Amino acid sequence: SGVSLISKFRGCLAGALFGDCFGAPFEFEDENGPSPVVLNKFFAKLEGPPFKTPKYAYTDDTAMTKCIAQSFVDRASLDERDIAKRFVTDFYTDTTERGYGGHVTEVFRKLRDQQCADPMKPASEQFNGTGSYGNGGAMRVSPVPLFCFGDYNRMIHVAKRVTQITHTHPLGINGAILQCLAIHQGLTLDPRGEPLDVQKFADELITKMEAIEEPDQIDGRRPYNTQLQLIKKLLAKEGGASAHQVQESLGTSVDALFSVPTAIYSFLRAQKPIPDIETDNKFRRTIHYAISLGGDTDTIASMAGAIAGAYFGEEEINDSYKMYCEYVEEILELANGLHKIAKE
Ligand code: R7I
Ligand code: MG
Ligand code: MG
């Protein structure tokens, strides 16, 4: 009974890839997000009769995800220097424009100059030593809950270390850990049978994050806790929260604090029908809704897609998507490799 773990692993990484590829054309395109008509047409076309088109390219989200997954598969252990080298090599050899974050390329330059001898140092120097709070750690964390499946404490540790290669601000690190936890919960829950208890899903994230997130030194509040409480409130709204409310409160920016909770909310909201989104498929609904909010659409859809894929498994993802994105076979092979390690 239920969905197999291998299907969940493949669904998770494929979900991250499809969210990235399909979200990328809309990234910061329109202040309020793409129009419902445009998005419904976009997805209907992908799910309709096959058509000839150049493949949708992945962006930095997938470029970095694949480096981490490949390192785990090849070395079967956490090797920060190896991951840093893969980030750098990929960045400097890739001839396709991947749309990296505005400041992270400075980390790559320093890593290259010191041949990744001290792989955690350049990131700590970002933004005058406070480190980046961008969502670049969270957007690429999906291999971690797969690689560390079955060892919760190690999973948190690895998520943190892998993030710190580029992001050392507590908000950058904790955003990656929260995304990791959401995927992990998705992997462990059975999507068949009882509908997902979305309030409970959020409550469990709150409990786990309370053990991880330090209160702010000035106001004593825990920023991700505040966002998670907001998710619960928005989910409880009669008739569903408006896009505007979600954009204004949870956010759609490149800051981890204002995008990771939005991705989690997208997944939870998509368990039920959403006005203007013409589909019964809950994976589609998740990434469609995430993109509809606008802003950092590739990253929010990628993170939401990873959670949805981990929960529903590969079978909920429309097969035709595989025709239209680059790197599909490869990402599924990486999921197989991580599954092999997790089984051992
Ligand atoms: O976080 P990062 O890897 O960017 C990821 C985003 C995703 O949307 C990708 O799809 C891609 O488009 O980029 O890259 P960073 O350069 O570390 O952070 C991204 C941006 O967040 C920076 O360019 C800054 O604008 C902002 N930012 C900060 N601004 C002020 N102070 C991140 N940290 C800070 C900060 O501490
Ligand atoms: Mg991107
Ligand atoms: Mg992005």
Image: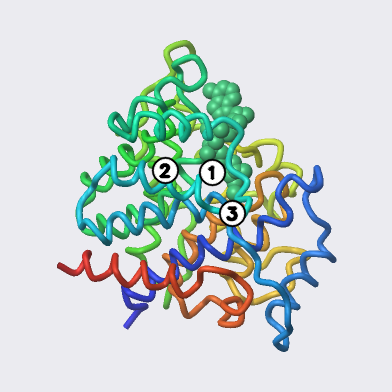
Q: Is residue 229 above or below residue 184?
A: above
Question: Is 259 on the left-hand or right-hand side of 174?
Answer: right
Residue extending furthest toward the bottom: 49
Lower position in the chain sequence, tag 2 or tag 1: 2
Q: Is residue 59 above or below residue 246?
A: below
Residue extending furthest toward the left: 344
Q: At which x and y percent is residue 195?
A: 48, 69
Disc 3 versus disc 1: distance between alpha carbons?
A: 32 Å
For the point 36% across and 41% down, the residue is 84
Which kind of residue does numbered mark 1 sit on? Pro
Q: At which x and y percent is residue 92?
A: 50, 45
Q: Regarding mark 3 in the picture, which secondary structure is present there? A: loop
- Name the residue tied to disc 1: 261
Dot 3 beta carbon under 8 Å from ligand 2:
no
Choose top left, top right, bottom left or bottom right for residue 42.
bottom right
Query: Quadrant location of the C terminus?
Result: bottom left
Q: Regarding mark 2 in the picture, which secondary structure is present there? A: helix
Please name whichever residue, 182 or 306, is drawn nearer the observer in this view of the structure: 306
Q: At which x and y percent is residue 60?
A: 54, 49
- Name the residue tied to disc 2: 178
